[in-house]
Image (spheres, helix red, strand yellow):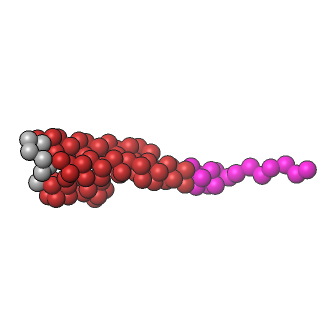
Amino acid sequence: MSTPRTMTAEETAALVRVRRRTAALAFVGVAIHGVIALVVVAEIIVDEPGRRGAAIGLLVMSVVAAALMYVGTRVLLGARLWSPVWIAVALSPAVAGFFWVL
């Protein structure tokens, strides 16, 4: 029986990078559903009498959820938090909800 080969430092670093990216993609895939769901529910209830405030509250919650999704993803990737392009991408569903619902 042969002994297992040990990984080099470069291979280990590559494996860690792939694991981080996979975890980040899975996290975004799950979290974006919550952000979009908040916007859709806000759209559904905005037309009901007296529910406009609740719809606005749901939209604000979607912005908070998108911000948490952004921070969580950047932490999982091990990247620095400040990235204006990715902040805009993360907040785009929530901001679009404000224009779509209101």
The percent position of residue 25, horizontal first and vertical second, equals 45, 54
Q: Is residue 88 visible?
A: no
Q: What residue appears at the point 35 percent right and 51 percent down from the top-left corner?
A: 32
Q: Horizontal placement of 68 versus 6: left or right?
A: left
Q: Position of residue 99 (x, y in %)?
A: 14, 58
Apparent side of residue 78 relative to residue 10 in the rendered image (left or right): left
**Nearer-the-camera pick, 10 or 33:** 33
The residue at the far left in this view is 50
Q: Give the residue drawn at x 8%, y 41%.
A: 50
Is residue 32 among the parts visible in the rendering?
Answer: yes
Q: Is 2 one of the magenta-colored residues? A: yes
Image x and y of residue 46, in percent: 14, 49
Image-quadrant location for residue 68: top left
Residue at 8% across, 45% down: 49
- The part of the chain drawn in magenta is 1-16
Q: Specify whether residue 9 is painted magenta.
A: yes
Query: Which of the pair 94/22 is nearer the observer?
Result: 94
Question: Would residue 93 be found to the left or right of residue 77 on screen?
Answer: left
Q: Nearer the viewer, residue 70 or 49?
A: 49
